Amino acid sequence: MNLSVVVPCFNESEVIDAFHGALLAALEPTGETFEICYVDDGSADPTRDRLRALAAGDPRVRYTSFSRNFGKESAMLAGLRMTRGEAVVLMDADLQHPPELLPRMLELRRHGYDQVVARRDRTGEGAVRTAFSRAYYRLVRGFMDVEIADGSGDFRLLSRRAVDAVLTLPESNRFSKGLFSWIGFDTVTFAYQNAERAAGQSKWGGRRLLNYGIDGLLSFNSRPLRLAIHGGLWLFLSALVYALWIIANVLLNGVDTPGYATLITAVVALSGIQLATLGVIGEYVGRIYHEAKRRPHYVVRETETDRPATGPDRA
Ligand code: UDP
Ligand code: MG
């Protein structure tokens, strides 16, 4: 098998058939042998029934369905584990990742690249979200040990050995953009024009995006902790200098200045910094706790090899 396409789906029943049609239209003319691995991330709409029907009618279609919503990262992991192809493409179900780009990705793969990344521009996206994303990626570049480009999402082709490398990474808190960058290999990026979601709704509200961003920052290093130590040391030094200055002032001039304002400011500023630092430490401790439990990333409800009593009949 040449190609596996992994598609995480969460409440995508409105677009899944259109997506599937577009995907077949793009793949069939290439003459490659392929499979399509859908992962239903615990959808509350008829997505699962649609996938079951698609798989029943076509041996190239496979699916895994989760027992509840485990998030896109878990869905992508399950999809990658399903794949058997020599190359794997990850794409969204909402037609924001145009299937027409697949031949181009396969072409670049033939040139020997292990990762082919389709990078979207930001046409049609809200100005606020664009500004925040830009700022975030600047911050990430400053902090992280891995390189993540603005706009390069999860739409990419990976070679078999790149997929195997990603699957060796055991962390339960998965931030794929970072993992893909971490594994290395020759990577090529090309740009495409951002498209609106074909139907249905984006699942990424502001809070979810913010949490995702924090995950990204903390997943790959302990630099925020280092920053807290540096900040603490500098504060301690300046406090020392200030104390010496006060003592000298009293000894030389004999004045003791009332200093409510300075005191309050110092107390408030310091507690702020301490709270933030504690938060950072807590975040890391929480992550250790989370990893230490070693829970599976998801629970499977059914796959195309199960034959649920209510499902369509298959031999
Ligand atoms: N998705 C998923 N689980 C989730 C949220 C999203 O599998 O908990 C899938 C979703 O079905 C889609 C892709 O991830 O195929 C991208 O989601 P969405 O379009 O909502 O994100 P956006 O394009 O707005 O970043
Ligand atoms: Mg989308």
Image (cartoon, rainbow, N blue to C red):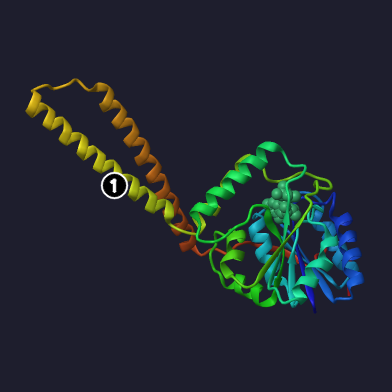
For this view, does 195 lie left or right of residue 148?
A: right
- Percent coordinates x, y for residue 32 in the rendering: 86, 76
Q: Residue furthest front?
A: 252
Q: Is 212 rendered above or below residue 85?
A: above
Q: Residue at the spot x=82%, y=62% of the render?
A: 101
72 vs 243, nearest the viewer: 243
For this view, does 123 lie left or right of residue 234?
A: right
Q: Quadrant of residue 77?
A: bottom right
Q: Is 48 rendered above or below residue 126?
A: below
* Residue identified by numbered label 1: 233
- Percent coordinates x, y for residue 190 in the rendering: 74, 61
Q: Is 137 rendered above or below residue 181?
A: above
User: Quadrant location of the C terminus?
Assistant: bottom right
Label 1 within 8 A of ligand 1 by Cβ: no
For this view, does 79 lie left or right of residue 236?
A: right
Three-letter residue code for mark 1: Leu
Q: Quadrant of residue 28?
A: bottom right
